[in-house]
Structures are given as structure tokens and as C-alpha cells.
Image (tube, rainbow, N blue to C red):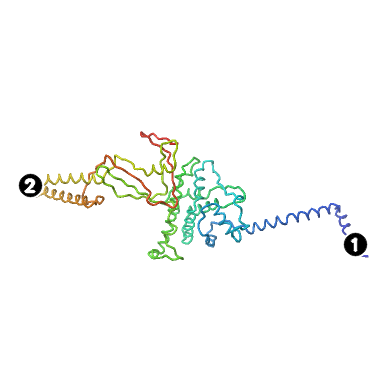
Amino acid sequence: MRPSKSSGLQSLLHDLNINPQYLTLAILACTVLILIGAPMFDSLLGYIWNSPPPESSSSSHRRSRRKSTSSGPPRTRAEQLRQRGETTGGSGGEGSSSAPHIDDVYYPGLVNISGTYCFLNSTLQALASLSYLQPQIESSRAKAEEWDVPTPVIDALRDTLNNLNTPHHRQKAFRPEDIIDALSRPDPKGNRSRSRLFSSREHQDAQELFQLVSSCLQEEAADVDTEVARDHGLAEVHRDDGDHPRKDVGSKNVFEGLTANRRSCVQCGYTEAVMHFSFDNVTLPIPRASQCKLEDCLKEYTRMETLDDCVCRKCSMLATLSELKEEADQLAAHAAAKKSSGSRQRKADRARALQQAVQAALDNNRIENDIPGLELKKVTSSCSTKQAMIARPPPVLVLHLNRSAYYGYGHASKNS
């Protein structure tokens, strides 16, 4: 007679010293865990499989990444979040269920290293909010990859800004050590010395850090353009197709603008030629008042200033013309009295020639042109005016509010 399965199981449990009641409870518990944990496990796998891979700085990954199909740079964080939902959340259409809600995400912060790097964190947070900066960085970085030119600051800044603009479902912060290391080291060609901003644990100036970042971006982009021009030569000037963009594309600094300075002499009425200077930030003085607006600071910057110690070109030429005429008359009279045509006569002729050249320059309004052999007598105008204007504003205008006030005799204070 064949033994039953139940009797065989009972004998096995008896041999293993297992209580059948405990075995029944264990089977029920495992069944409950499977029913509850299966959906959670499936959601976890779906999150892992559907999550985008982390950004990598390796050259192989950067060469294989696809070009963005976005219609333009985002101007707000909400627009940037919607674009991320279109590219990483499946269909990407309006009302897509995969796009996270704006109220359910958190943008990461920065760890204040040593408690004194607030100047760095505030500058990086401000740069991360600029929609015009990201296309410049991406363009310069793509060209650097194509021509194998090292751009450590551009790469580190791109990764840092991407981390700051990537939303998460929980609060987090990271240490900006990559950008600190890139800014602290000399550039690959040795054109820039090591920065001392991070050599100590003291508080530093945020404007000085911004100028360092801006100059590094411009220098590295110029290195890439130099390499492109060296390989292509004159053909690069005429190349303007989609596969080989011109070398000036992406090389312009979004912070770079052009100022115009004009100076006039009140005594003679002469206005010098307008001088243009490039800038990446504008220092605005703060008016001495209990309160003011940004418009007041801009008006103070463009206000006409009165000077009393500037050399006027036209006044100097008029004084030089008078001296040359007097010198020529004296030499001619002395030579005629002695009835000699020697060295004094030659000096008189030379003085007459310079006199005629100065007079012609004044008559033809060529005051700024240099006259060969002429030693100009410098005359300081007792009253002249100077005015600064922004001739070409940059895409991103950086304003530095100068709180320092100088009262003469070396005394300075903060205008707060």
C-alpha cells in the first residue's frame, strides 16, 4: 500500500522537529509579502529602467550624446522642467503623466565649504539662472571636443550648472569641488596663474570671482578658435555651412559689452574722439542717500562729470602753434639782422613748416592726428566734462554695486 503525501509530509516535519502550525503561519506571511511587495518592486524597476543615465564628462560619452531638439533655451524654471518632461518622460506632450509636478520637485543647493564660500555659492546660483549662458557653454564645449582642446573651466562649470538645474524628488546639496579645482589650477598653456581666491578659508569678493570665471570662459573659447583657425587657415574665413560652422559661433562672451566715454573741453569747446572699451560687468556707484533705486545708480553712472585736471588736445595744439609762430619770427629776424642763411635760418624754416602743419590740422579738424617731429606742449584744461555711456549692451548685463565711498586724504568707508 503506497503511503499518502500527508503522512509523508508529517513524518518529514517530525524528523526536522518543525511544528506544522508554525509552517502554516510562515506560508501565509510569505504570501502576504509577495502580494504587497510585487507592485513596489515593479515600480522600483520601472523607475530604475526609465531613469536617464547620469551625465558623464568622458570624451566617449560626450561624442555619442545626441543634439538637443529643444526649440530654444528655457527662460524660467517651469519651462525648463517641462522641457525635461518632454525629453525624459516618454511622449513629452502636454498633460504627460510622467512629467513631475512643479510643486513636487526640489532643486539642489550648494554646500558652503568651510563656511566662507558663500561668495562662490551665490555666484554659481546666479549663473545657473541664466538662459543665455548655457548655449554658449554647450557650443564652446562641442567645438573643444571636436578639435581636442582642453577646456577644464567650461567642462566643470557645465557640470555644476547642470546639477543645479536638475530637479529631484527630495532635498539635496552637493559640494562644488570640480569648479573650485578648475579655477584654482593654471590653464593648460600656462597663460593664467593660480587664483588665490581659494587658497585660504577667508571670505572673498563675489565680483572678483565672477571676473575670474568670465575671463576663463573667454580665454578657453579663444584657445578653441585659435586651434580651429590654425587647422583650417584662410578657408575657415569663407566656410559657412551647417557641417562646419564659422569660428565666431559660440565664441562671444554673453557678458561682454561695449562702453563709450566722451570728454569735452569747456574752454575751447573741443570734444575728443569717443573712446570704446569692452567690459563684462559695470560698477555702479551708490548715491549718498537714505534709499535709492537701480535707476538712480544707472543715472549716477551716466551722469556728466566735471573735471579740472585733464589735458585738452586742442588747447595744447593752440599753445604749441603760438610758440612755433613766436619761435619762427625770432629766428627769422635774427637771421635777417646778421644777413646769414646758416643754421638759424634752417631752424626758422623748420619752425615755419611745423607751424603750417599745426595750422592745417586745426583748420581740417585733424586734431587727433600726430604730426611727425612735433613736440606738443601739454595744456591742462581748467574745466572739462566727461560722460560714460553703454554703446552696446551685452545679452547678460552684470551690475556691481560699489558701496565703497572715498572722502579724500585716504579715508574710505562703506556706503550702507
**Residue 7, above or below 124:** below
The amino acid pointed to by label 2 is: Ala
Q: What residue is rendered at 12% in x and 46% in y?
A: 329
* C-beta proximity under 8 Å, tags 1 and 2: no
Helix, strand or loop at disc 2?
helix
Q: What residue is rendered at 46% in x and 42% in y?
A: 205
Q: What residue is rendered at 58% in x and 47% in y?
A: 173
Q: Quadrant of the C terminus?
A: top left
Image coords of residue 30 (percent x, y): 78, 54
Q: Quadrant of the N terminus?
A: bottom right
| Precedes in sequence: disc 1 or disc 2 | 1
Residues 293 and 64: in front is 293
- Say which residue label 2 marks: 336
- Say which residue label 1 marks: 4
Image coords of residue 240 (percent x, y): 42, 65
Residues 192 and 20: in front is 20
Residues 151 and 363: in front is 363
The amino acid pointed to by label 1 is: Ser
